[in-house]
Image (cartoon, rainbow, N blue to C red):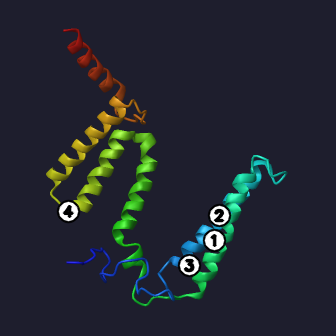
Amino acid sequence: MNRTETDHPDGEPGANPDGEDEHRRPGELAFAVFLLIASCGLLWSAYGIAGFEALSSPGAIPMATTAVMVVTCLIVVARTAKLTQTPKETLRRDILPLTVVLFVLLLVIYGVLMKPLGFLPTSALFLVIAIKVLAKRGWAWTIMISLCSLLLIWLVFRIAFSVLMPSGIVPEAEFIQIFRDLFSRGAEQ
């Protein structure tokens, strides 16, 4: 059995929906223009480091790199603009389905809530929503898997590796001290 598994509704693998090079996918031109604008912004920032004084100046390598990005983005935009859009695909169904849009929003909300709420409540909320949406299981299973995963992540990164995470509304320092006291009493006996 030599069948390629894909998530594409048409069951076609690869970047080109038709397997042909004369069609562009929905949103491809807009993304290429976005990359060109971002590359121009990076070139301007690189120029702001030290200008273009000499090849040995601190901004020479960043400027050369971003200049290459601008040139290649211009080529990509020009080539993409010449292509006709594929009639088989839509932006909403094939490129940005509702699940992708939801997770982009969830990640933005996660970033915004991280500082005021802290790592534990924000991550718990994110995991519960993400697992519920993706697994489509019951609430008890979703909450159990989310909280167990969060506890494991917290123990590994915060306790074992001492990675600092925003504590927010949870008295995380007190929890850590309880763990340290438990382990230090066990070592003394």
Closer to viewer: mark 4 or mark 2: 2
Q: Which residue is at 35% across, 70% downward?
A: 98
Residue 73: give its label: 1
- Cα separation, mark 1 vs mark 3, equals 11 Å
Q: Are marks 1 and 2 in contact (CB under 8 Å)?
A: yes
In the rendered image, the residue lying farthest to the right is 53
For the point 85% across and 51% down, the residue is: 53
Question: How many numbered callouts?
Answer: 4
Residue type at mark 4?
Lys
Q: Tell whether label 3 touches label 1 (CB within 8 Å).
A: no
Identify which residue, 177 or 28, lies in the foreground.
28
Question: In this view of the protein, can residue 44 be seen by the observer?
Answer: yes
Disc with the residue nearer the chain's start (1 vs 3) = 3
- The residue closer to the viewer here, 122 or 73, is 73
Q: Earlier in the sequence, mark 4 or mark 2?
A: 2
| Mark 1 element type | helix
Identify residue for label 2: 39
Q: Residues within 10 Å of mark 1 (few under 14, many from 20)?
A: many
How far is the residue under mark 3 from the one under mark 2? 15 Å
Image coordinates of residue 157 in percent, x first then y, are: 35, 35
Give the residue displayed 43% in from the left and 33% down from the top: 164
The circle drawn on residue 136 is: 4
Residue identifier under label 3: 29
Q: Position of residue 32 (x, y in %)?
A: 58, 73
Asked if disc 3 and disc 2 are in contact, CB closer than 8 Å, the reply is no
Marks 3, 4: nearer the viewer: 3
Q: Residue at x 30, y 26 (%)?
A: 175
Q: Residues within 10 Å of mark 4 (few under 14, many from 20)?
A: few
Which dot, 1 or 3, sits closer to the camera? 1
